[in-house]
Amino acid sequence: MSTRAARRPIAAALVALALVGTTAACAPQPTTQLLTGAAGVGSAQESVQDTAPGSAPQAAAGGTTSGTATAAADCSDGLPAVASADPDGSPEVTSGSTMADIRERGALRVGVSADTLLMGSRNPFNGDIEGFDIDVARQIADAILGDPDKIQYRVITSGDRETVLEDGDVDVVTRAFTINCDRWENIAFSAEYYHAGQKLLVPSTSDVESIDDLDGQRVCAPEGTTTLERLEEWEGVEAVPAATHTTCLVLFQQGAVDAITGDDTVLAGFAAQDPYAKVVGDAVSDEPYGVGIPAGQPDMVRFVNGVLEDMVSSGEWEKSYDRWLGDALGSAPDAPEPVYGRTP
């Protein structure tokens, strides 16, 4: 049996998992809800979601540890893209604030992935959505509502991330969301909470070691991502867009594409699912992740930044990294140093 043929059962399982990730088919839990629909948008349904910590999946993939943000070109306001609003102290829910409205509603609405292993994915055994991004969302919910389980998860694609914020469908997005100047034009961001880099996933038998070896090959990346924008600029490479990261992986396992490019966090999860794949190459980009927040909510931006500072100082950031990413990407680096100075 060829390695590509051997991948077919895995691909079928992943398709099933992706479908489960956009429905609420199991028994409900009392405090956490899942919002679903054609693109992760629709009516509220109670879900099986009980995001109490569990066992992290085991992974083994090549890659370097993440680090702090590198220098980047300034945005039109003269500030670097990663600059956010100074929290000015510990997070506090004040009367009349955005956070007070969320507390009155009784749940934090969060846009997430349900198919990005290690960052945000549905556990097929218990139905929980879990990962590093989910831990960040839980910290925010706990700070506002006093309970990390009081979350309504809305499963979205990468291309939906700005739209659900602009339309007011969610309060925040924690979905491997790269901070950049163009996005600041439409939404707001927290300070950086994780620093990723774009790499390649190729078959374990491949001789490809970097983007220089991809001439004439088909490479997949999700629509609506900075990864796809960069891929389309690579000479000699056929860019293949897909709706989600999981779709890219299925195409890869079916032999429809030769490689996948994406953030090392995402690719590490893919390698954990497919023993016939490996992560290669040095990072060709800096991908600073931030919490996406609707524009015009500076109080929420400052609050979330306070939560992130507390997450780092309390050791929760390092614990979450070790639980989800340590096996794949090595020992925990220092958390990104926040940059402040912007008024959202």
Image: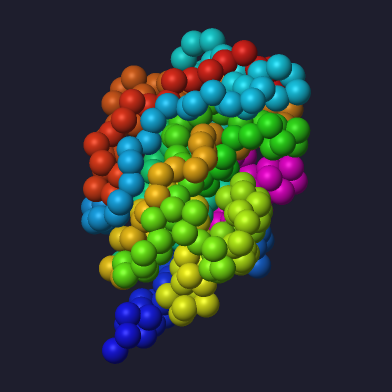
> Does 169 appear in magenta?
yes
Q: In this view, does 163 lie above or below 203?
A: above
The quarter of the displayed image where residue 9 is located: bottom left
Q: In this view, does 202 lie to the left or right of 73?
A: left
Residue 34 appears in the figure: no
Taking depth in this image into account, of 243 and 93 the one nearest to the observer is 243
Taking depth in this image into account, of 42 and 117 the one nearest to the observer is 117
Give the magenta range.
153-172
Q: Is residue 297 above or below residue 122?
A: above
Taking depth in this image into account, of 67 and 202 the one nearest to the observer is 202
Tag count: 0
Residue at 54% from the left image edge and 63% from the top image edge: 215
Residue 194 appears at what percent x and percent y? 44, 34
Q: Is residue 21 above or below residue 78?
A: below
Q: Is residue 95 left or right of residue 272?
A: right
Q: Is residue 61 above or below residue 64?
A: below
Residue at 52% from the left image edge and 77% from the top image edge: 256
The quarter of the displayed image where residue 5 is located: bottom left
Residue at 32% from the left image edge and 70% from the top image edge: 205
